Image (spheres, grey):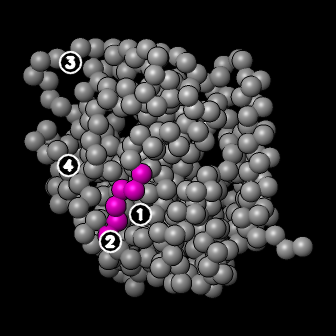
Amino acid sequence: MQYSYWDIQLLLKKAAFFIFSNFLLRSTINPSRELDTPSMRPLLPHEDIDFICNETAALWPELRGKRIFLTGGTGFFGCWLIESFLAANQRFHLNAQLVVLTRSPEGFLEKCPHLAGQSALRLERGDVRSFAFPDGEFSFVIHAATEANARLNAENPMEMLSTILDGTRRTLEFAAEHGTRKFLFTSSGAIYGRQPEKISHIPEEYAGAPDPLNPDTAYANGKRTAELMCMLYAKATAMEIKIARCFAFVGPHLPLDAHFAIGNFIRDAMQGDIIRVNGDGTPKRSYLYASDLTIWLWTMLFRAPSGVAFNVGSDEAVSIRQLASAVAEIIHPAIEIQVAQEPAPGAPLLQYVPSVDRAKQQLQLKVNIPLQEAIGRTAAWYGHQGR
């Protein structure tokens, strides 16, 4: 009997949810860590992957019979890109292959065991700064290594900077030598530096920058310099370089125990703990759901013009205090919210909200999943059963 990709996925999903649910029922010690144990994460929601395939259907014929190389495949972005690729490859009969660079193939398969044995997926062991080049031609490269790790940026900024710059150079060298036509670099909204209070939504044309004399800006300045490096390769080769300046996101695979406020709030609400807001709760952010993020990244790889940066994120601004309230309302309405400080009179407003007009107008992209639904879907994936 022949089983399709989705037949296998559904069987594995039932098993994964059974294991995950029983694990949560047994967890009584240090649940904040165990909620986010990688080996217990279930499959991505079928409805999300199906929606991505539907929204990107016109893009995939360009990939037929081709190969993609992906760095950062074990991170938040990578998990969504891999699973959506596998689904599209099967649905549209692409006969394509995705080669993923990872420092630990074993760790990746522990995190996503349902992807083991997929013939269209190949894992290559290596560090992004020094990996051995796989043989053959790769028409497309997505360089998504180096997540926004605040701890690494604070404790070892030289390592952060090296990973970004040396990793980008190595990946570009690989692409230039292996027939790559389109190269997508996932940059960051951090390259703009502090967003001025008078600009509610920061556009791609904004010429601000992070302070190069501040060691805390290693991540931001690394991404900024990596963009320049990409453009130097675009000038010297025939590659089309696509730049995605990514802001803040929410969805399955977002760590609940890292520095992401929305992940911490979801974790606390699911455990019935107090939601604690550090600071005064006035900084503004925006959050794009992961299925929309994935649609945007695939669209940019195939359709974005070369040498043009696009902000990636939601333009719906929300304060951290409002975010905490929204999480509580959706997951645990009776939960207490504690805000550490009162707003200081006259203090400047801290913002991190993109203008996405360029993506909307040039690529016809949009925000499909509102924040409240995004929070609910994320919590459900992590085991929340609803009210």
Q: What residue did someone put label 3 on?
A: 343
Distance from Cα at disc 4 to Cα at disc 3: 22 Å
Q: Earlier in the sequence, mark 2 or mark 4?
A: 4
- How many labels, in total? 4
Q: What residue did someone put label 4 on?
A: 201
Give SS at disc 1.
helix
At a point 73% along the width and 59% down the height, the residue shown is 9
Q: Which mark is residue 296?
A: 1
Amino acid at the residue labelled 3 = Pro
Amino acid at the residue labelled 1 = Trp
Asked if the residue under mark 4 is in contact with the one under mark 1, i.e. CB atoms within 8 Å, the reply is no
Q: Which residues are magenta?
A: 363-369
Amino acid at the residue labelled 4 = His
Amino acid at the residue labelled 2 = Leu
Distance from Cα at disc 1 to Cα at disc 4: 18 Å
Asked if the residue under mark 4 is in contact with the one under mark 2, i.e. CB atoms within 8 Å, the reply is no
Distance from Cα at disc 2 to Cα at disc 3: 39 Å
Asked if the residue under mark 1 is in contact with the one under mark 2, i.e. CB atoms within 8 Å, the reply is yes
- Quarter assignment of residue 225: bottom left
Residue 269 place in picture, x, y as percent: 51, 24
At a point 36% along the width and 20% down the height, the residue shown is 278
At a point 27% along the width and 20% down the height, the residue shown is 280
Q: What residue did someone put label 2 on?
A: 363
Q: Earlier in the sequence, mark 3 or mark 1?
A: 1
Q: Is residue 9 left or right of residue 338?
A: right
